Amino acid sequence: MIFSSCFANAEQKPNFIIINCDDMGYGDMGCFGHPTIKTPELDRMAYEGQRWTSFYVAASVSSPSRSGLMTGRLGIHTGMYGDKRVVLFPDSPKGLPKEELTMATILKNEGYNTACFGKWHLGHKPEAMPWSRGFDEFYGIPYSNDMSQKEQKNVYGNKNYKYPLPFYENDKVLEFEPDQTQFTKRLTIRAVQYIREQTEKPFFLYLAHPMPHVPVYASEKFQNTSKRGQYGDVIEEIDWSVGQILKTLKEKNLDKNTLVIFTSDNGPWLTFKENGGSAGLLKDGKNSTYEGGFRVPCIMWGAMLKPGVISEMGSTLDLLPTFCEMANIKLPSDRKYDGFSLYPTLTKQENIKREYYYFYRGSELYAVRKGKYKIHFMTKQAYGPGKKIILKTPLLYNIEEDPEERYDIADKYPEIVKELEAYTQQYKAHETIKESIFDLPAEKQSTNSRLKN
């Protein structure tokens, strides 16, 4: 399969750029409805490309979400989930299993240059870090920006946290406790430099901004400039960053042959109030199985796209199969993928193959969406001491008419409830859940020995 109509010549493979934010909510940019955050570059990107309004992540927290993006597989199939610990921590003994193939590995094996700049969060041990998982270059941090001795003390008042945040260049630590006001600017400069250096081989750039995850920081130029306050400053700097990336692609005449995807790893961290983002009209946020936790903003941009607004279900799980089809790469057939290629939708706006979407919290399936209907079998508040509630009668929403999940229609459509209950039972009976990696006992070693890894 050669896409000669899309690319400059029949042998030229497309370049791929994923810009993945951390905890950016569905309602945090102008083109998704925010009234005061100014995002002219993202708005232009959406106008020129495709704005996806029902785009989901693999999980509503960082590590299992990013694992799904990288592998095209849900956490229950890779072990990248937790029922006790929902993400990986600096004392987690393992990371992404060696047998899992990342999109970087697959693309690199087919002749791509690959780079990861920003936040990783799929394991801090050498065997799980980007340089061991298909990336030629790494420049950034191994986990979230609050997993820091300095920030734990400043933000949470935790004076006994023993792990200083390292900043890496490839497999070497450049510094500890870097200046976080420079993160977005620093990573953007490196990404622009990387794009300018790409002259012969196709490339894959994964730009994973640590922001706007709490604590939020912007560089001097953007501080105290947004009507939305400090959080708005951060989003507006990310918008600037996107503009720099697209400008560089055009200057280097790479825009005709590059697919750029902008999205977030999960919904906003609402417990931090004004320092967290907004899910817009969607219910709840990060760590929730309601729409605000799983549905994220997504914009796709490139000359091969048919511009428009896509309201069908898409997912970060789909990116690996999409890249492989576009690059004429056969997906390995020895494992189950949970995503579908979006290539027909990108180029012709044809229907997506996905019929169902699954909302897992750890190993448990809380909700299922089929078409316009979403059924909740259990609920639990995103954070705090609240217990899981197993619903005697599931909640049913028409997610197209009621994206806010405000109006339970289970009593009006008992036949839909019965159908989705039967389907879910059958689905669960055929699913094999791999043992959790996140819930393994924490490492027992000193700070110094950990940092030598």
Image (tube, rainbow, N blue to C red):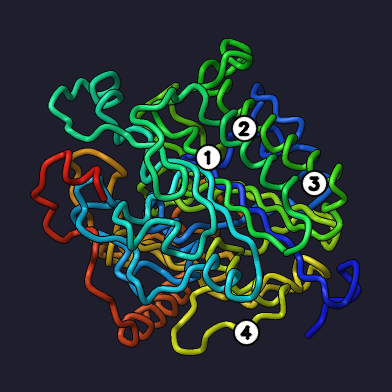
Q: Residue at x 29, y 31 (%)?
A: 148
Q: Which of 363 and 156 is in front in this view?
A: 156
Do labels 4 and 3 touch, CB within 8 Å?
Answer: no
What is the C-alpha distance between the residues marked 3 and 1?
A: 19 Å
Q: Residue at x 67, y 39 (%)?
A: 32
What is the C-alpha distance between the residues marked 4 and 2?
A: 34 Å
Image coordinates for residue 123, horizontal then vertical, percent: 32, 55
What is the C-alpha distance between the residues marked 1 and 4?
A: 30 Å
- Badge 1, how many Cα within 10 Å: few under 14, some, many 20+? many
Q: Mark 4 — residue?
A: 330
Q: Which of 282 and 333 is in front in this view?
A: 333
Q: Nearer the viewer, residue 354 or 372?
A: 354
Mark found first going from the N terminus, 4 or 3: 3
Q: Mark 3 — residue?
A: 249
Image coordinates for residue 17, horizontal then vertical, percent: 66, 54
Identify the mark at residue 238; answer none if there is no mark.
2
Mark found first going from the N terminus, 1 or 4: 1
Q: Regarding mark 4 in the picture, which secondary structure is present there? A: loop
Q: Residue at x 49, y 31 (%)?
A: 277
Identify the mark at residue 209; answer none if there is no mark.
1
* Amino acid beneath label 3: Leu
What is the C-alpha distance between the residues marked 4 and 3?
A: 27 Å
Name the mark nearer the viewer: 4 or 2. 4
Image position of 245 (left or right of 264): right
- Badge 3, how many Cα within 10 Å: few under 14, some, many 20+? some
* Amino acid beneath label 4: Lys
Q: Residue at x 34, y 30 (%)?
A: 176
